[in-house]
Amino acid sequence: MPRTPSGSNGFVRIRSDKAIRVPKTAEIVAGRLRQQIIRGTLREGDLLRSEAELMEQFGVSRPTLRETIRILESESLIAVTRGSRGGARVLAPDIRVAARYAGLFLQHSGATLEDVQAARVLLEPQAARRLAEERAESAISVLRNHITLESAALADGPEFAQLSTRFHELIMELAGNQTLALIVGMLRDIIETHAARALTPEAIAATRTDLAVRSHKKLVDFIEAGEADKAMSHWREHVNSVAARMGAVMGERRKIDLFE
C-alpha cells in the first residue's frame, strides 16, 4: 500500500490518511527483552548482559538502550542497582503492578470498595465449586497443609492475616483458571491496600482467627466430599462475611483512593 516516509513525529501516512504510529527503537528492544522474560528465556534473578554487550547485541546507541531499561524498570520487569557490582536484574511479573493499574482505572471511574468486594463474591465461590467437582487429592492436601499452618498462627494476628489471605489465593490457583485467579488477585490487592491503612493492630488482634480456621476446614471437607453446591454456598457466605467485616471498618461505599 503506498505510503509516505515517516516523519519526525514517529508516524507514517498511508493512503487512507490514517496515522500509524511507528514504535521507537527503544520500545522495540524493550519488547524483545520483555518477550524473553515472559517466556522464561530470562529468569527471575538473572542479570541482563552488560550495557556494552546489549548495545552490540541490538545495534543501538547508549541513550536508546538506557531508555529501554527505563521502560522495563517502569513495568517492574527489572530492578536496576548502581555501582561496580550493579546491573539490571530480572524480576518475575508481579500481580501488584497489574492491581495498581486496575486500581487507578477503578479510582478514575469512581468505583467503590463495595464494587470490588461484590466482584470477589461472584468469582471466588465458583472456584470453590470447581474444586469440589474435581476433588483432586493434590489440591485437598495443599489446602489441609495450609490450614495446619493457620492453626499454628492463631495467636499471631498479622501472621494469621497473611496466611488467611494465602488460603483465598490457593482456592483460586488450585481451581486451575489462571485468568480468574489473576482478576481476583488484583481485586484482593486493592482491598488490602485500603485495609492496611484502616485496620489497627488492635482490630487485627481482635479477629476471631479460630472461626476463620473452622470455616476453612469446613470448605475443604465439602471439597473432599465432592459437595459442589455446599462448597460454593459456604464459600459465598464466608466471603460475604469477610467483606461485611472489612466494610464496617473501611466503609463499603467509600471510593477507591490509592493516594491517601
Image (tube, rainbow, N blue to C red):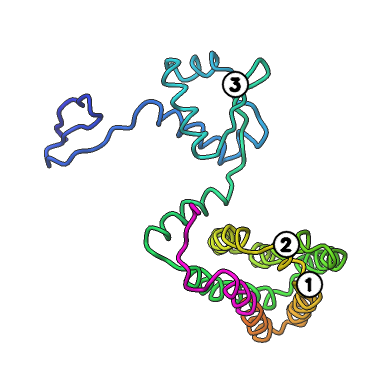
- Quarter residue 250 falls in: bottom right
| Residue at screen point 77% across, 80% down | 218
Rounded to the nearest whole Å, what is the CA distance between mark 2 and mark 3?
A: 45 Å
Residue 104 is situated, as x and y percent measured from the top left of the image, at 44, 54
What's the amino acid at mark 3? Arg
What's the amino acid at mark 2? Pro
Number of other residues with Cα within 10 Å of mark 2, as a class: few under 14, some 14 to 19, many 20 or more: few
Q: Which of marks 1 and 2 is nearer the N terminus?
A: 2
Report the side of 217 relative to 111 (left or right). Answer: right
In the image, residue 238 sits, relative to residue 1, either above or below, namely below
Q: Mark 3 points at which residue?
A: 49
| Residue at screen point 54% across, 62% down | 187
Q: Name the residue under label 1.
A: 209
Point out which mark residue 120 bears: none
Q: Earlier in the sequence, mark 1 or mark 3?
A: 3
SS for callout 2: helix
